[in-house]
Amino acid sequence: MNRFEGRKVLITGAGSGIGQATVLRVLEEGGHVVAADIAEAGLDKTRAQAAEAGTEARLSTVTVDISDEESVRENAGAAIGKLGGLDVLVNAAGILDSRHTETMTLDFWNRIIGVNLTGTFLMTRQALPALLATGKGVVINFSSTSASFAHPYMAAYAATKGGIQSFTHAIASEYSKRGLRAVCVAPGSISSGMTHNPGLPDDTDFDLLAKLSPALGKGFAGPETVAGAIAMLASDDGAFITGTELRIDGGTHM
């Protein structure tokens, strides 16, 4: 498939996990991609995988701290300018950490909010002029099954993901007459760096986590599972999908 031939795509969180898998999928389908991440080492690995696949000629990278307004303005803004426009923004960057809510500090709360929710806003705001100029721009945001289903010890993370869902609905409506589509993916039971080390408390009650197992297959799925869904949603195959969520969790929350 060449669903992204001639299309310009910016993907955050591109140095690992689902973001990296999405970069590789969009490149495979013919897209021109800017991979953005806060970690240069992760971007090196993404570049190496693109080189192995023979798609590195259509890949550029940029280091961005999505929680910092100036970094987004300067670095992401310059990347969009270098692309010469933008068709799709994928806000895959995020962090997951866990705490007992009664001992959660304000600094901890603000760090999760700053990256996940504020970062999604800052990147979207920066990209909107270029996306709207196309008349058919697409924003793919990352919610989580934790936004709609109880995930213990993750109150801050869940709050950001619920906020991202609502933010997505709002911009989908606000810019619908200008051709913009905005959609959330809500992954769950996906194996990635984030889920390998969720920072659970030492006294975690694992009975509370027992329900977080997929019905399909023999365990968690890989990040390429979500990347495939994003490719559909961001392409013309998803042209009539906006202002909604796609839950990708192998039936964990049926």
Image (tube, grey):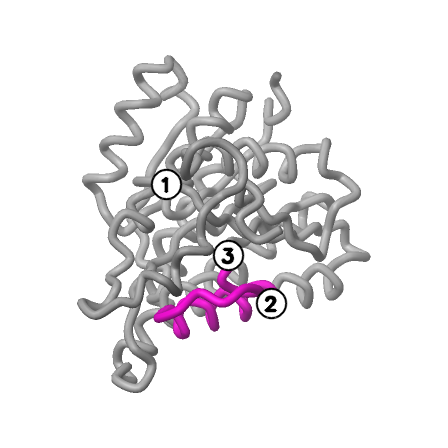
Q: Hey, what amino acid is under mark 1?
A: Ser
In this view, 192 is above or below 156:
above
Q: Give the mark, 3 or 1, whose residue is nearer the N terminus.
A: 3
Q: Hey, what amino acid is under mark 2?
A: Phe
Q: Secondary structure at mark 3?
A: loop
Q: Nearer the viewer, residue 112 or 61?
A: 112
**Left or right: 81 as drawn, with respect to 166:** left
- Asked whether disc 3 touches disc 1, contact meaning CB atoms under 8 Å apart, the reply is no
Q: How many residues crowd mark 3 within 10 Å: few (<14), some (14–19), many (20+)? A: many
Q: Secondary structure at mark 2?
A: helix
Q: Main secondary structure of the magenta part?
A: helix
**Left or right: 70 as drawn, with respect to 248:** left
Q: Hey, what amino acid is under mark 3?
A: Ser
Which numbered disc covers residue 97? none
Question: Which residue is denoted by mark 3 in the rendering?
Answer: 144
The x, y position of residue 243, in whole percent, is 71, 57
Q: Residue at the spot x=59%, y=56% of the render?
A: 128
| 253 in magenta | no
In this view, 65 is above or below 36:
below
**Left or right: 12 as drawn, with respect to 9:** left
Location of the N terminus (image quadrant): top right
Q: Secondary structure at mark 1?
A: loop
Residue 164 found in image quarter: bottom right
The x, y position of residue 34, in whole percent, is 42, 38
Q: How many residues crowd mark 2 within 10 Å: few (<14), some (14–19), many (20+)? A: some
Question: Which residue is denoted by mark 1 in the rendering?
Answer: 191
The x, y position of residue 185, in whole percent, is 57, 49
Question: Which residue is denoted by mark 2 in the rendering?
Answer: 167
- Report, in whole angstroms, how far the alpha carbon at label 2 lies from the one at label 1: 26 Å
